[in-house]
Amino acid sequence: MQEVYEFLKECETYYLATIDGNQPRVRPFGTVDIFEDKLYIQTGKSKNVFKQMTENPYIEICGYKNGKWIRVSAEVEVDDSYEAKKHMLDNYPNLQDKYSPDDENTQVLYLRNATAVISSFTEDDITIKF
């Protein structure tokens, strides 16, 4: 999981796919955190992406850096704890003008049943399950 975290962190921007009815939706994301041995992402409860993830928790993440790409397939689980939200926002101070751990909008979610595959054109794939 640490390798997946570092890869996504170094990407700075990765792309998260959800399902909206029968339509895939992809958008850029940038938050990733490890808290209590789980990999987390963050969004706002008011956003369509959050509504899509609560209706269908299966997501896929894709990121690219230095000639390698990562694809992470997982389920997301909502975590409403103040501590998880604070940990995320402490690591992303640039978001603190928009989000707060005790507001009604900030949401963190952790990945479960995840499989990450790191690929390139020149090396064998690396598969990581967490």
Image: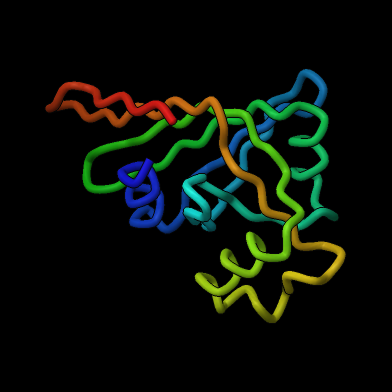
* View extreme (bottom): residue: 97
Task: Examine the rendered structure and indicate whether residue 119 appears above or below residue 81.
Answer: above
Q: Nearer the viewer, residue 31 or 75?
A: 75
* View extreme (left): residue: 122
Task: Examine the rendered structure and indicate whether residue 32 appears above or below residue 71.
Answer: below
Quadrant where the N terminus sits is top left
Q: Nearer the viewer, residue 112 or 36?
A: 36
The residue under the point 46% across, 31% down is 72
Tell me: 106 left or right of 46.
Answer: left
| Residue 4 at x, y percent in the picture | 37, 42
Kindly indicate the quadrant of the structure image that contains residue 22. top right
| Number of numbered discs visible in the structure rendering | 0
Kindly indicate the quadrant of the structure image that contains residue 78. top right
The residue under the point 67% across, 53% down is 108
Task: Examine the rendered structure and indicate whether residue 67 appears above or below residue 88.
Answer: above
Quadrant where the C terminus sits is top left
* View extreme (front): residue: 36
| Coloration of the structure image | rainbow
The residue under the point 30% across, 44% down is 3
| Residue 126 at x, y percent in the picture | 25, 26
Tell me: 32 left or right of 99.
Answer: left
Kindly indicate the quadrant of the structure image that contains residue 124. top left
| Residue 99 at x, y percent in the picture | 72, 72
| Residue 70 at x, y percent in the picture | 36, 35
The residue under the point 72% across, 27% down is 19
